[in-house]
Amino acid sequence: MKEPVSRRSVLRKISAALAGLATLPVAKTAQAAVQKILVSASLPRGYDPKKHKWVMAIDANRCIGCGLCAEACKRENHVPEGPFFRTWIERYIIAKPKEGSGEARGETFVDSPNGGMHGFPEPPVPKEDIQHSFFVPKLCNLCERSPCTQVCPVGATFDAPDGAVLIDPKYCIGCGFCIQACPYGCRFLSPVTKTAEKCTLCYHRITRGLRPACVEVCPTQARIFGDLMNPLPEDPIQRFYQDNRVQTLKPHLGTGPRVFYAGIDKEVR
């Protein structure tokens, strides 16, 4: 999901971007310009991002690895063909420990062929040697303290007031800094637009009262989406928090993910 970027090309793009920014009024930073474009001008009439706080929850106990979410995301967001995904499914297989090893578990195998879109092959170990296996959907973690926003040299990636982390392609120079900074591997450089891409929670849908495409197609309701500021009757997000031991990925990094998981093992990266 990551495309190598040469140091020379990065420096060349940053220099060009900074030269362009120098022509803007001093008081108007790139960050302010991006927020004005994406958070105000392009939103549907009546949508106030300050009155929403979007979150995503994943119940790994329910995920069957069908890959429909990844397929729907590709279609809905015009994700380029090939190894590029805004969301994908990983399979974790934990083998039984070798006899006499004294270990509680054996080797862990992780795979995600074609993002999990067309199912998974036979396990790499005999079924009788598997101790535990499960599927984990992955996507942008909507970090409160996003490393990607901190390293973007032109303010193209930013935190929206409603909890979404967005990228404005008009400002993105394709330097790849955000791709390298993301500890979750959630970004890629589009071979079509030459700009960074990632999950936006289907921002064009949720700001119009619809659910993200991946949530819409999930046959087992493994993906739960909601608005903390506007809970529904029998709110699925609140029920998810009440019924599960909720975790986030890589909490030790201090990024403050707003994608929450249930049913994941400590081996999940």
Image (cartoon, helix red, strand yellow):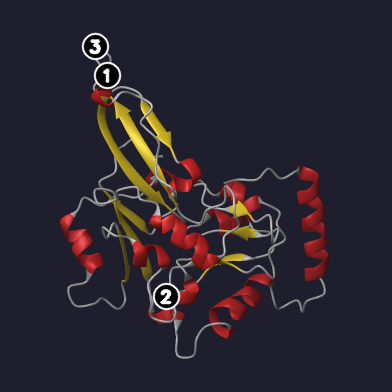
Query: Spatial distance from mark 2 to mark 1, Cα to Cα?
Result: 45 Å
Residue 97's disc number: 1
20 in relation to 62, above or below: below
Across and down, in percent, residue 268 comes to: 36, 39
Disc with the residue nearer the chain's start (2 vs 1): 1
Q: Which residue lies furthest to the bottom in this view?
A: 45
Residue tagged by mark 2? 206
Separation of marks 1 and 3 at Cα, in angstroms:
6 Å
Q: Name the residue rendered at 69%, 59% in the picture.
A: 192
Quarter where residue 99 is shown: top left
Disc 1 crowd, CA 10 A, few/some/many (<14, 14-19, 20+):
some
Residue toward you, 86 or 52: 86
Which circle's residue, 3 or 2, is located before the other in the chain? 3
Circle 3 packing at 10 Å, graded few (<14), some (14-19), many (20+), is: few
**In this rendering, position of residue 86 left or right of residue 256:** right
Q: Are discs 2 and 1 less than 8 Å apart at CB?
A: no
User: Where is mark 3, residue-wise?
Assistant: 99
Please tell me which residue lies in front, 155 or 44.
44
Q: Where is residue 42 in the image (x, y as percent from the top left)?
A: 57, 82
**Element under disc 1:** loop
Tags 1 and 3 touching, CB below 8 Å: yes
Residue type at the position of mark 2: Ile
**Callout 2: few (<14), some (14-19), or many (20+) C-alpha neighbours within 10 Å?**
some
Q: Distance between the residues labelled 3 and 2?
A: 51 Å
Residue 267, visible in the rendered structure = no
Instruction: Give the answer, above or below, for where 266 lies relative to 259.
Output: above
Which quarter of the figure has residue 174?
Answer: bottom right
- Amino acid type, mark 3: Glu
Q: What residue type is labelled 1?
A: Pro
Q: Residue at x 59, y 59 (%)?
A: 197
Dividing the image into 4 quarters, which one contains the C terminus? top left
Q: Where is residue 30 in the image (x, y as percent from the top left)?
A: 68, 71
